[in-house]
Image: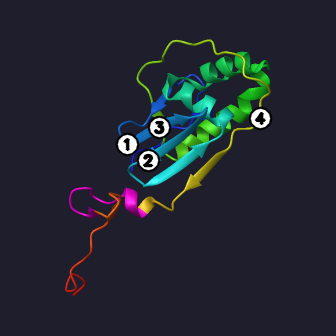
Amino acid sequence: MPARAVPSADTTTPFRAARPDVIDETFEGEVTLIDLRSGMFYGLDAPASAIWLQAREGRSPAAVVDALAGSYGTSAEELAATVVAFLDRLCEEQLLVPAETEAPPVTLAEVGAWADPQMQCFSDMQELLLLDPVHDIELDANGWPIPRAQPADAGA
């Protein structure tokens, strides 16, 4: 397993999404992440989504804090510890990896009051997400993937 980088060690090192293994989609302002290596998926609330959307593009923790401070109308000092702790968590889950170069800073629209970011982790589809789609699944009557039935002598 490669050594993971943790942003609190250096707030100037940019990070990016661990593509192609990590995919994300935004639904009504909140991000859902899927780690195709582990089969885990994650639901991010609005503040966590704002952090992810900045960090996944190749921005340093300091740049993420600066962008969010302007967006939430608070000081960078007030946000720094919380944002860096959440970036640590994203790195621990191996959803973020170090980037080679830093993306340019952005100005975000104001979004309201800041709240601590929250991430929910789900493993209930892990077994299905880790199946090999060519060899390990078949489709049910409605077209949903299900594990392929194993022959009776497969366990022998």
137 inside magenta stretch: yes
Q: At 51% from the left edge and 12% from the top edge, which residue is drawn?
A: 104
The location of residue 125, given as percent across then percent down, is: 46, 60
User: Spatial distance from mark 3 to mark 1, Cα to Cα?
Assistant: 10 Å
Q: What residue is disc 2 on?
A: 35
Question: Counting other residues with Cα less than 10 Å from the Cα at mark 1, is it few (<14), some (14-19), or many (20 or more)?
Answer: few
Question: Counting other residues with Cα less than 10 Å from the Cα at mark 3, is it few (<14), some (14-19), or many (20 or more)?
Answer: some
Callout 1–callout 2 Cβ contact below 8 Å: yes
133 inside magenta stretch: yes
Q: Residue 24 carries which label?
A: 3
Secondary structure at badge 3 equals strand
Most foreground residue, 31 or 66: 31
Which numbered disc flags the more N-terminal residue, 2 or 3?
Answer: 3
Type of residue at label 1? Asp
Q: Is residue 89 left or right of residue 38?
A: right
Q: Residue 115 carries which label?
A: 4
User: Spatial distance from mark 2 to mark 3, Cα to Cα?
Assistant: 9 Å
